[in-house]
Amino acid sequence: MAEALCFFASPARVPKSLEIPMPIRSRFRSTMLLVAWLCASLLSAQSPTEGDVLLRNFHFTSGEVLAEMKIHYRTYGTPRRDAAGVVRNAVLILHGTTGSGAQFVRPEFSGSLFGPGQPLDAAAYFIVLPDGIGHGKSGKPSDGLHAKFPRYGYLDMVEAQRRLLVESLGITHLRLVMGTSMGGMHTWLWGQLHPGMMDALMPLACLPTQIAGRNRVWRRTIMDAIRQDPQWRGGDYQVQPQALRTAAGLLYFMSSNPVLRQEDAPTLAKADANLDKFVSTYLKTGDANDVLYAVEASRDYDPGPGLERIQAPLLAVNTADDLINPPELGILEREIKRVPKGRALLLPLSPQTRGHGSHTVAALWSSHLVDLLKQSEPR
């Protein structure tokens, strides 16, 4: 939250004759910081409405079928319909691998976006935060089917999101689709699979191309470690396989940037302590099958062939310190030229960026979201 506040409460430059004396200015700045913190805290403390839907006879691209596919979701705000009964203020926000919609309730995200006068003011928008298949409180392997759970992919996850909106929430149009990491990749797929269904798209921390290179390698390393662990037992383990530690370590490694890691852990002992703390915390709730399925789900992600089909204005935002989507690849800059109304933005490394995790620090990119909403305002 501190990163967001430093933008909100930076003192403005004023003529010397009008400067506030230092003691008063210091108290004023402290007061403004407190006000900003309270606003964000109050907003984040407002619990979203939560619900579950059962999608009947859900067909996966693998050919497998579940009689009932449970999808959990959270919402802020109220849907508003036009004269024809179409909801016009719905916003779909999609989470990353092994995450859930709960990550958007945190102050650094909701506190910068959903409050009064903010870009996605919940008084004006109806915000939908689903838990993807295999994630959060939605149906997943650890619920009981273990390795017998259908092998879902990103196409299945997008279809479940669509059915949640259309069949359960009565939403056939979206003011905005945005997502972080895996959710950003889903956003690219939404734009080409359902091109007339949204006014704007904002994928964050991802690339519009098949998972390959280093991005594939760290995922494959997790998958192999779990499957080759004797404790995995084909997915029917009684205790969590030790390979879950490897998975947790890799997730920790890829999520931040080297500068922050060095600052947080300037000694060997501190680096070991930080890693041990993250892994031990992760092991309390993590599940090997859930992680295996989640990282493997990206196997069918390949938006490249359909980029020209995207009709809505699209703003893709990446950061220069993202280890998963490094700017040196030049992929986003090349592929965005194929999107009719597409634009790419690369945020430079700064004290406020958090590597791949920058996607959830909304203060870094919220002003660009405002511009996208203005650009895509329906006539």
Image: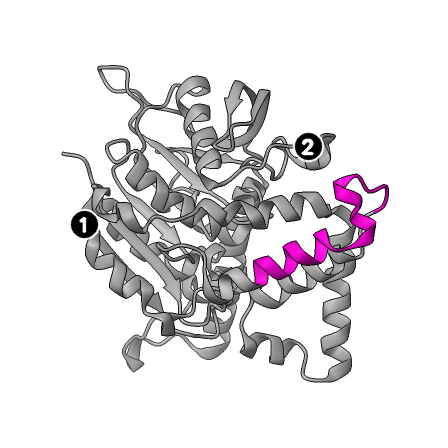
Whichever of callouts 2 and 1 sits on the residue coming sooner in the sequence is 2
Which quadrant of the figure has residue 245?
bottom right
**Whole-number angstrom distance, CA of label 2 to CA of label 1:** 42 Å
Would residue 230 be counted in the magenta stretch?
A: yes
Up-down relation of residue 341 to residue 91 (above or below):
below
Total numbered labels: 2
* CA neighbours of label 1 inside 10 A, class few (<14), some (14 to 19), many (20+): some
User: How is this picture coloured?
Assistant: one colour
Up-down relation of residue 263 to residue 230 (above or below):
below
In the picture of the structure, the residue carrying the numbered disc 1 is 341
In the picture of the structure, the residue carrying the numbered disc 2 is 148
Which quadrant of the figure has residue 139?
top right
Look at the numbered disc 2 and give the secondary structure of its residue: helix
Q: Main secondary structure of the magenta part?
A: helix
Question: Magenta span covers which residues?
Answer: 218-239
Up-down relation of residue 23 to residue 324 (above or below):
below
Q: Which residue occupies 60% across, 39% down?
A: 135
Q: Position of residue 375 (x, y in %)?
A: 19, 47
